[in-house]
Image: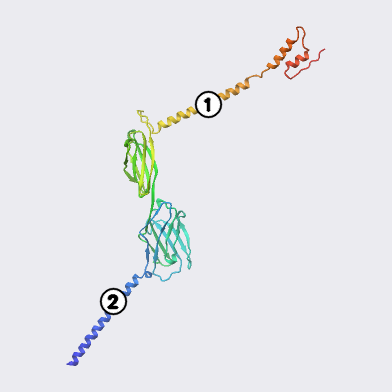
Amino acid sequence: MEGSIQLLACLACVLQMGSLVKTRRDALGDLLNTEAHSAPEQRWSMQVPAEVSAEAGDAAMLPCTFTHPHRHYDGPLTVIWRAGEPYAGPQVFRCTAARGSELCQMALSLHGRFRLLGNPRRNDLSLRVERLALADGGRYFCRVEFAGDAHDRYESRHGVRLRVTAAPRIVNISVLPGPWHAFRALCTAEGEPPPVLSWSGPAFGNSSAAAAVRDQGHGYQVTAELPTLTRDGRYTCTAANSLGHAEASVYLFRFHGAPGGASTLALLLSALGLKALLLLGVLGARATRRRLDHLVTQDTPPRSQAQESNYENLNQMNPPGHQLPRVCREELLGHHQPVVHHEK
């Protein structure tokens, strides 16, 4: 009886030990799988910041590093950067590296302003953008391709946002004709953060008024409109953001009471036209006077007073009835062209 009890106790002990061993193996296996999937060298991944900010005219760096499932890769590779959206956005940069080479030969650089800073062999695809403009703002996506099957390539899905900041700049201000012979003013400015626009002019006295703003299709460009200009004078548009401000002016002058309306700049053009006519008149009068003086000088015959006076004096010096020899008289009358006649 005691032997049977000991046998049962031994069997229970063996069952407990087997159960314990199985549990440890399962736990160890799950732990190894988790580490394998989480190990950076065992999967594809991209590490990029959410946003990079820089001022217009400066340069910006877009960081991008990656991991891949290969412990070591020395074959050909391609680096690609896109703008706008992943997988389908336009490429702004592309380079390729040959097998065993750390030099990535550039194949595309939009406007020559993009160049690779990182070393793809060391899992670094960082890009530098030169001479930033407001239009460069947006999202950029890095991608790396290994020479192999379709699974040996990876691209960031969320990308990095490039934020380009700039003080306001007014790109256009104008006065346009409106309905019922009225006029309206438009002002377009750009900047980042988007500027706030305001108008000042004769209709507002010494103060200014914020204007209704509409987007021009770009996040950094806005337009404000004055729908009706009721008074003549100078209207000024001011754009301001946290980095500065800018302003520009436009003038309105009308012929009041003219039938059918008048052009905005008709008065200015009339004044300029009158000045031009006066200037042409003065120049024409001077030219006419010079021409007349020249003609008078050409038409006046040469004076011979000296010859006549000499001849008269000679006549007075000689008594009546006594005449000069004919040869002398001919020489005096001939004015340096003596003509000799032989007397018989």
Residue closest to the eye, 253 or 75? 253
Question: Of all residues shown, which one is farthest toward the top?
Answer: 321
| Three-letter amino acid code at the position of disc 2 | Ala
Res. 316 mark: none
| Three-letter amino acid code at the position of disc 1 | Gly
Q: How many marks?
A: 2
The structure residue drawn at horizontal position 63% and vertical position 22%, both measured from the top left corner, is 298
Residue 226 % position (x, y): 33, 39
Q: How is the image coloured?
A: rainbow
The numbered mark, 2 or 1, whose residue comes first in the sequence reads 2
Using the rendered view, name the quadrant where residue 129 is placed: bottom left
The structure residue drawn at horizontal position 60% and vertical position 22%, both measured from the top left corner, is 295
Determine whether the residue tagged by mark 1 lies in a helix, strand or loop: helix
Residue 150 vs 207, above or below: the answer is below
* Side (left or right) of 318 relative to 77: right
The residue that mark 1 highlights is 284
Residue 217 vs 257, above or below: the answer is below
Tell me the quadrant of the picture where the C terminus can be found. top right
Residue 105 % position (x, y): 48, 61
The residue that mark 2 highlights is 27
Tell me the quadrant of the picture where the N terminus can be found. bottom left
Residue 284 vs 40, above or below: the answer is above
The structure residue drawn at horizontal position 47% and vertical position 60%, both measured from the top left corner, is 106
Q: Nearer the viewer, mark 2 or mark 1?
A: 1
